[in-house]
Amino acid sequence: MGHAAHFLRRLDRVSDAHVELALALYRDDELLRDVLSRTSLPESAERVAISLADPVEGPFVVVTREGRFVTCLGEGMRANNLPIVTRERLDTASARVQRMRDELARIRALADSGADGQAALAFKRMQQQGPRFAREDAEILLRVQPLIERELYRRLCQIHGDIGKHAQIVATYRIDQPKRLSRAQKDHILALGDMAWAAANLIMMMGSPTMRRRFAKMEDAKPEDGNMAAALALLTAKLGTNMHVVRALWLLARSGKRALAQVKSMELRRVPLLRLYREMALAAIAAGSEKLRAEALKALSTGTPPEGNDHRSALERIAIGNAKLLELIVQDPAEFEEGYLEVSRAYAADPNRAEEPTEEQLRAVPDDVARIAWVTCSSSFHMIEELRNLQVLLYGLPMLVRLPAEQLFLPARWAQKHIPEPCVEHVLFWFRPYAEAYGLAPSRTAPRKASKVGRNDPCPCGSGLKHKRCCARGSGEPA
């Protein structure tokens, strides 16, 4: 008698309450594979008992490690010497497999509806419209994200590589004198800006459960690479604008314990301003996860601020001060959120901040725009004089990292009104401090010229002869 037939005949050992569960497992190869693949079995174990209720008293379904059904053991029949899969683990696997099936059905429905065609246009606009890329297009991409997640991830990695190469080239231009730039150089600078904004937009596609599972698989395959989500977030945040930093923090808030470990171990010596990013990253993780909150807050900088007048000491004082402030903000976000919204709403009403906006102008700003207007400000945390703007951002950080992805994009009608067309000056505004922070800008100091040796002076080579009778000969100088 085959295993399956024997198993079916032994179902009479199981109460009616558990027969349906046993048969559901028997009919569902995918579920059984998931259960067995996530169970650590000893090398010597040829069979495993899956508990339908109590892990000791049973009843059990007994299967081989290859997934063939052997028999049923009724309640009270012990599965001696067999590895046990608990009912809790079975239920977790059932929920996981059902989510996979629901996701697959959603992907098929999206493909059948032709939504992936709309996504192609939105994907193109995301790389061409810079900070003006609108919420409506972001929503299209987020809807079809499971269909195009490989392309999204591949493109984000490619863009970050291209940013590094282009930044090295642009840093050699006379970026301190834009009027002296050639047309080709200006086009190159605008292309760098497009890449930078595309990175900020793409990072918002990385926070879905499917992308988090993809990151986990990548990390399991190459643990030496660290946390991929944290690495991509850091690459994006390094560009330094409010938009890049907040979106990177938004991804970190969703990336779990491994991201926290990587943030805690960040290398800070080369670029002191990364210390500020580290404090914000810890606060973002604390705001996004109650489970990790205590550990993240504990890692915030503490101690007595240094008294030196050098740049590094000043930044360390700011970082320690920010750490204390962020702890208060995370623990009581509502008290600070109102202050952030007030400044952000005023900025939305008048981005140029030429004069105080009127009450009518403030009321005209929709709440969803007021929440993120300040995020679109081009202030860079690489500019120490802009750090007062950074403090405003800290007040709203817990709210910002908990927003749905699409809510961190402006609606199209407001993006066109609120954000100016990208231009060379706007790109250079954030690029100059970024290039300086990472040592990309070449030195503009002119090389010192050696003092000229007179014809009748002693030769500097130390021969004791006059220069005209020694090294000047054959050098092109008149002897």
Image (cartoon, rainbow, N blue to C red):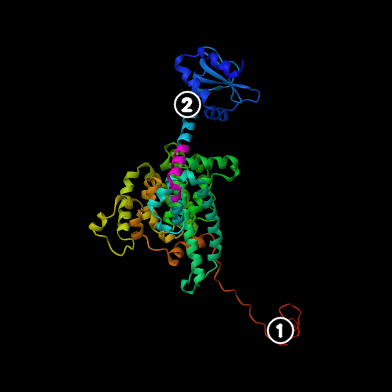
Residue at the spot 48% in from the left edge and 62% down from the top edge: 431
**Image quarter of residue 284:** top left
Q: Position of residue 455 (x, y in %)?
A: 70, 86
Q: Is residue 248 magenta?
A: no
Q: Is residue 106 magenta?
A: yes
Give the numbered dot on residue 476: 1
Q: Position of residue 112 (x, y in %)?
A: 45, 43
Inspect this view and state whether residue 70 appears.
no
Q: Which residue is mark 2?
A: 91
The residue type indicated by label 1 comes to Gly
Q: Position of residue 42 (x, y in %)?
A: 63, 25
Viewer-nearest residue: 66 or 299: 66
Which tag, 2 or 1, sits closer to the chain's start? 2
Classify mark 1: helix, strand or loop: loop
The residue type indicated by label 2 comes to Asp
Residue at the spot 40% in from the left edge and 63% down from the top edge: 421
Give the spatial CA distance, label 2 vs label 1: 89 Å
Give the numbered dot on residue 236: none
Above/below status of 38 relative to 431: above
What is the magenta segment's predominant secondary structure? helix
Which stretch is magenta? 103-117
Viewer-nearest residue: 463 or 170: 170
- Bin the neighbour count of mark 1 within 10 Å (Cα to Cα): few under 14, some 14-19, many 20 and up: few
Left or right: 129, with 220 as reference point: left
Residue at the spot 46% in from the left edge and 32% down from the top edge: 98
Left or right: 391, with 441 as reference point: left
Q: Position of residue 410 (x, y in %)?
A: 36, 53
Quadrant holding the N terminus: top right
